[in-house]
Image: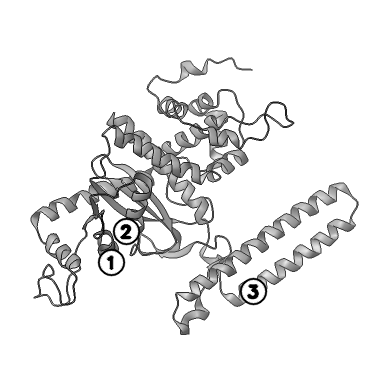
Amino acid sequence: MQILALDSFLPDDHAARVVWEYVEGLDLRELYSRIRAVEGRAGRDAIDPKILMALWLYATVDGVGSAREVDRLCKAHMAYLWICGGVSVNYHTLSDFRTGHGEFLDELLTESVATLMHAGLVTLRRVAQDGMRVRASAGAASFRRRKTLERCEAEAREQVEALRAELDEDPSAGKRRRDAARQRAARERSERLRRALAELGEVEAKKKPDDKEKARVSTTDSEARVMKMGDGGFRPAHNVQFATDTGSQVITGVDVVNTGSDQGQMSPMVEQHEERYGRVPDEVLVDGGFAKSEDIEKVSSGEQATTVYAPVRKPRDADRDPYLPRAGDSKVIAAWRKRMGTKEAKEIYKERASTAECVNAIARNRGLKQFLVRGLKKVRAVALWYALAHNLMRAVKLR
């Protein structure tokens, strides 16, 4: 037995105290409403959502992304012990909580940024967007073609049926439990294969007719795609999109897609800002990978127009000025070309690297190098945790 005053072991300015103070100010009624074991009903006492919320926010700031590692730290590390306050947690609960409340985390991001906007700390005057390829929880060898997937899915379905029949016939309780576990594993494998076959249709639709047979998807994470990574290699990954206010370096928008290219991602992010905050950024800074004419046209038109700062692609003819309008350019595209040729635009564009790439680097340093969860829904929830943790630390410095 150890008798400890946990509060005396943690400095007053420790990040865990900052996280806890932030969580205490949150409206968590939605999370409390999901608890079924309440007074007057049967069931074990639930862990307070405040504890789980604070644990994952602090773990993200601390660069810990594994539920098992957080579970271990809750028994050995003073900051995690202080957050738990004597309440025991387990990695299953931690893992489920992390990925099971994506919509709540999304709303929390909107509310937290709106609060900073009300305080004048975030303006949305200028927003930088960048994509970051993050390794998926799937191996390259898990990718299969249609013929193999169909065969494996049929075998898995037969195995599920055989195990179910075996479970019904056997009266032994101990063996029945083991068979139930085997049946559950077989059923989950069969479901993964069905999802992979469903995703394969989407992949095949993007291929040329002669290349459809070459289409492959992963049986581990069917929504992961092979992408070119920063080191030049190709691996299964997800494309995380962060939009950041350049004046405060606060993340204002989050999205996750399974396309290796950033083309077409600017317009959805601008629309996301309008949905979240009722307005679009005055200016958006993106790299050449986002510079798609259709997107520039879309965000630069309408009642709420956004001014785009993106580099103009160098022409094949070295003698031609890239900033002069081309034949067939619309007024919007011609204005964009002309704008990017000015000194003012080039100075403004320098803020993109110091904002978007800085935020990406901070996320990498906090452990966003490989996802340990599977599927876009869960992956997006993890990306939201990183955004919330980043914004919390930024808000402390801004204030």
Which amino acid type corresponds to the residue marked 1 in the rendered image? Lys
Q: Is residue 355 left or right of residue 10?
A: left
Of circles 1 and 3, the one toward us is 1
Marks 1 and 2 in Cβ contact (< 8 Å): yes
- Residue 114 in the image: state x and y as whole percent: 35, 38
Which amino acid type corresponds to the residue marked 3 in the rendered image? Glu
The residue indicated by pointer 2 is 266
Disc nearer the start of the sequence (2/3): 3
- Residue 389 in the image: state x and y as whole percent: 40, 38
Taking the spot 44% from the left edge, 48% from the top edge, the residue there is 383
Q: Which mark is residue 150?
A: 3
Rendered view: 35 above or below 245: above
> Between residues 192 and 344, which one lies in front from this camera angle?
344
Disc nearer the start of the sequence (1/3): 3
Taking the spot 57% from the left edge, 61% from the top edge, the residue there is 220
Which amino acid type corresponds to the residue marked 2 in the rendered image? Met
> Between residues 264 and 302, which one lies in front from this camera angle?
302
Circle 2 SS class: helix
Circle 3 SS class: helix
Q: Residues within 10 Å of mark 3 (few under 14, many from 20)?
A: some
Rendered view: 97 above or below 316: above
Disc 2 from disc 3: Cα separation = 37 Å
Q: Quadrant of residue 388?
A: top left
Disc nearer the start of the sequence (1/2): 2
> Where, quadrant-wise, is the C terminus in this rendering?
top left
Taking the spot 11% from the left edge, 70% from the top edge, the residue there is 324
Rendered view: 170 above or below 215: above
The residue indicated by pointer 1 is 292
Q: Is residue 194 left or right of residue 176?
A: left
